[in-house]
Image: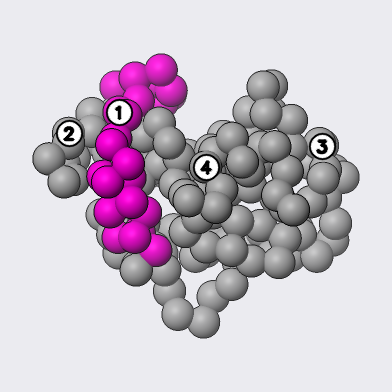
Amino acid sequence: MPHATAVKFGYPVSLIMDAKAWCVLLRPAQVTLGSLVLVCKEEAKAFSAISAEAFIELGQMVGGIEAALSRFNPYDRINYLMLMMVDPHVHFHVIPRYGKTQSFDGANFEDAGWPGQPVLQAATTLSQEQSAKLRDAIAACWPAGTT
């Protein structure tokens, strides 16, 4: 059964990749095009509390994320933010960064913080249909043979 943090970020509707210890979800509020959430499925509420297996799988998931996002829409930089203030379970906000405005399915995505820190409050809200298209487009770019 998924924990509250995964559910808050739309699990299972937003699911891009599901592995043993981690899942990758499309971030409901798109800070930049392709913003994701990498959620540890364990009940851990501290990074040091995840299992050794989860630490090993984390590297595989990061590789899959970077490959998928690069194939989907090449980014200039990528940020992984661990912000467990409101949502207590171990998770990272994955924010691809772009020096120029990006577009997808009729929506524009400005990186309001470029080249500095991402501005999480400046996120683009998509319709359910746009979110499903974006989720599916990124999932289709996930590299074969990775978790």
Q: Amino acid at mark 1?
A: Thr
Q: Which of the two discs, 4 and 1, sits closer to the camera? A: 4
Residue drawn at (41%, 17%), measured in percent from left and top?
121
Q: Which of the two discs, 3 and 4, sits closer to the camera? A: 4
Q: Amino acid at mark 3?
A: Ala
Q: Counting residues from the N terminus, which is met first, the one under dot 4 or under dot 1?
A: 4
Residue drawn at (36%, 34%), measured in percent from left and top?
30
Q: Counting residues from the N terminus, which is met first, the one under dot 2 or under dot 4?
A: 4
Separation of marks 3 and 2 at Cα, in angstroms: 35 Å
Report the magenta residues as a range. Answer: 112-139
Query: Which residue lies under the disc numbered 3?
Result: 46
Query: Which residue lies under the disc numbered 2?
Result: 108
Q: Amino acid at mark 2?
A: Asn
Q: Please report contact status of discs 2 and 1: CB closer than 8 Å, yes or no.
A: yes
Mark 4 surroundings: few (<14), some (14-19) or many (≥20) residues within 10 A:
some
In depth, the one of 83 and 88 nearer the eye is 88
Q: Counting residues from the N terminus, which is met first, the one under dot 3 or under dot 2?
A: 3
Horizontally, residue 123 falls left or right of residue 13, namely: left
Separation of marks 4 and 1 at Cα, in angstroms: 16 Å
| Image height of 117 relative to 23, above or below | above
Q: Which of the two discs, 3 and 2, sits closer to the camera? A: 2
Query: Which residue lies under the disc numbered 4?
Result: 10
